[in-house]
Image (cartoon, helix red, strand yellow):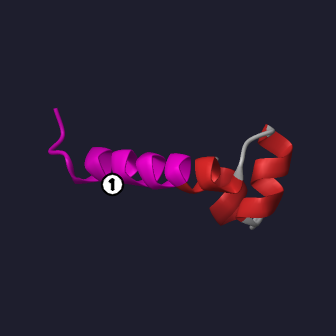
């Protein structure tokens, strides 16, 4: 989903249509995905 939004530059409306989800659901999913990615990038290497 992050790829669709950031690299392919699809709007939330287009992502929602492709995923058969509401725009609100896409907004929530993107927020959670970006937060998780941020956690992973900020974590110290193991």
Q: Is residue 2 visible?
A: no
Foreground: 12 or 33? 12
Can you give x and y, in whole percent of width and height, for residue 38 in the image? 33, 54
Query: Which range of residues does the magenta coloring cover?
Result: 28-46
Foreground: 42 or 4? 4
Q: Is residue 45 magenta?
A: yes
Q: Residue at x 19, y 46 (%)?
A: 43
For label 1, the residue is 38
Q: Is residue 25 visible?
A: yes
Q: Residue at x 18, y 40 (%)?
A: 45
Q: Residue at x 74, y 67 (%)?
A: 9
Q: Residue at x 57, y 57 (%)?
A: 27
* Quadrant of the rendered image containing residue 11: bottom right
- When the figure is inspected, residue 23 is found, relative to residue 46, above or below; the finding is below
Which element carries disc 1, helix, strand or loop? helix
- When the figure is inspected, residue 2 is found, relative to residue 40, above or below; the finding is below
Can you give x and y, in whole percent of width and height, for residue 31 in the image? 46, 55
- Residue 38 is left or right of residue 7, and the answer is left
Q: Residue furthest top?
A: 46
Can you give x and y, in whole percent of width and height, for residue 7 in the image? 69, 62
- Residue 2 is left or right of residue 4, and the answer is left
Q: Where, quadrant-wise, is the C terminus in this rendering?
A: top left
- Residue 22 is left or right of residue 25, and the answer is right
- Residue 28 is left or right of residue 1, and the answer is left
Foreground: 7 or 13? 13
Q: Magenta residues: mostly which secondary structure? A: helix
Can you give x and y, in whole percent of width and height, for residue 19 in the image? 78, 40
* Quadrant of the rendered image containing residue 4: bottom right
- When the figure is inspected, residue 33 is found, relative to residue 14, above or below; the finding is above
């Amino acid at each position: 989903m992050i790829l669709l939004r950031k690299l392919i530059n699809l709007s939330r409306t287009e992502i929602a249509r492709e995923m058969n989800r509401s725009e609100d659901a896409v907004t929530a999913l993107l927020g959670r995905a970006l937060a998780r990615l941020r956690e992973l990038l900020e974590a110290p290497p193991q």
